[in-house]
Image: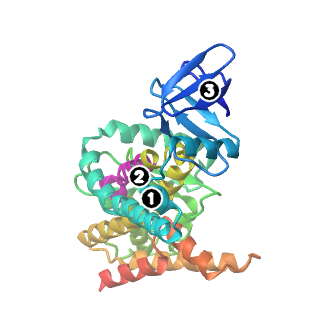
Amino acid sequence: MNANYFDAQSSIIQPANIRIDADQIKITTSQFNKFFSKKTTRVAEPYLNAALILQFDDGSHCEIHAPVDQQAALTQIAYQASLVEHWQRNWGIALFAIAVVLALFYGSYRYGGPILAKQIVPMIPQQADDFLGTEVESMLDADYFTESDIKAEQAAQITKVFEAIKPNATRIPLRLELRKSEKIGANALALPNGSIYLTDAMVQHMPKQNSQATSQRNSPLNSPLNLPLTSAGEMQLAGVLAHEIAHIELRHSMHNITETSLMTVLLGATIGDFSNILSVAAGGLLNARYSQEKESEADEYAIRLLQSRGISPAHLADLFESLDQDTSTDKSTKKKRQSSWLEDQINDYLSSHPMTEKRIERFRQAAK
C-alpha cells in the first residue's frame, strides 16, 4: 500500500510503501526500510474522507489516503471500532451526548463560574482594575467621547449631586467625568478604576428648572436655586450615579472578566483546535446573561443607597420611562425591517441590561 511517512523528527513528507504481514509492518522509502510490531501499532480513529493514520511506537506515523488501501490496512490489522465510535454513528446517542455536554458547560458557567470568581476576584489586586480602566478610558476618549457642552454652573450642580449620593466610605476613590457622545447617546458607565462617565444626552433627559424659578425646590440633596436641574432631575441623576457606583463597589467588571475567562479556558481545553472561535463566542454570549444579573445587583444597590438618602426609587423609574419613550419614538421615525419573535428573544437575551419594563417595575415596587 502507498502512504506518506513522517519520522517525528521533521515535517518532511516521505513517500513510502507499506507491507503488513502476520506480525510486523514494513515501511520502505527511497532511503531506508523500517520494521514495526503490529501489536504495538495504534490506529487513530478513522474519519470519512480523511487519511488513515498508523502510529508507531517510536513516535513516527504514516498516513494512508486511498480508500481501498485504508480498508485493506484496517482488515490486516484487525481494527475494532470502539464503543464510542459506535455511539457516534447513532444520531440519538450523539444528540443526547451533545445535550449533556452543553448542560455541563452551562452549569459550570452558571454556577461554577460565579462561585470560583467570588474566590478569585478578591485575590486580584486593584492595580489590575486600574490598568483595565485606564486602557478603556483611552479608547473611549479616542473613539467615543468628545468634550462636554454642559456649562460650569450645571456641572457644579451635577458634581454636588455626585458628592451627596456617594457612600460615606467607598472601596476606592470615585471620579465623575462629563462627556458628549454621539455614538452611545444617553448613557452612563462605570470603569473598574473608579471613573464614572455621564453623557450630555443623559443629562438632557432629566427635568430642568424654569429659568424664572424663584423658590427653593424641596430636595433631599438640598440643591441651590436656579440651577439647570429641578429637584426631580437631581434625584433622577442621583439614581443613575448610585447605579454606576454599585458596579464599582461590587467590582462587577472584574467578576465578568473572570467568569468569562474561566468559561473560555474550559471550552478551550475541551474543544481544542476549534476553541479560538467557539470559546470566545460562547464566553461572550453567556457573559451577556451575567451582565444582566450584575445590572440587577446594581439596581438593588442603587435602591438601598437612594433610600438611605431619603430619595424615592420612583424617580429612577421616571427616568427609564422617559428614556424608553424617547427610544421608541426614535425607532418609529426610522424605516426598519420587521423583526421576528425569535429575533426579539435573542436581542432581549443578548442585551447587557434587563428589559426596561422589568427595571421600572422593580423601582416602582421599591418606592412603595
Q: Circle 2 — which element?
A: helix
- Disc 1: which residue: 287
Residue 191 located within the stretch drawn in magenta: no
Badges 2 and 1: C-beta atoms under 8 Å apart? yes
| Residue 5's disc number | 3
Q: Tell me which residue sits at (25%, 41%) in the image.
A: 123
The alpha-carbon separation of the residues under discs 3 and 1 comes to 46 Å
* 150 left or right of 317 in image: right
Depicted 218 relative to depicted 184: above or below: below
**Mark 3 or mark 1, which is nearer to you?**
3
Q: Identify the magenta region.
A: 245-267
Quarter that holds the N terminus: top right
**Badge 3 vs badge 1, beta-carbon distance below 8 Å:** no
Q: Which of the two marks, 3 or 2, is nearer to us in this view?
A: 3
* Mark 2: amino acid: Met
Inspect the image, locate mark 1, and give the three-letter code of the amino acid beneath it: Asn
**Nearer the observer, 211 or 254:** 254
Instruction: Assign a secondary structure to mark 1.
Output: helix
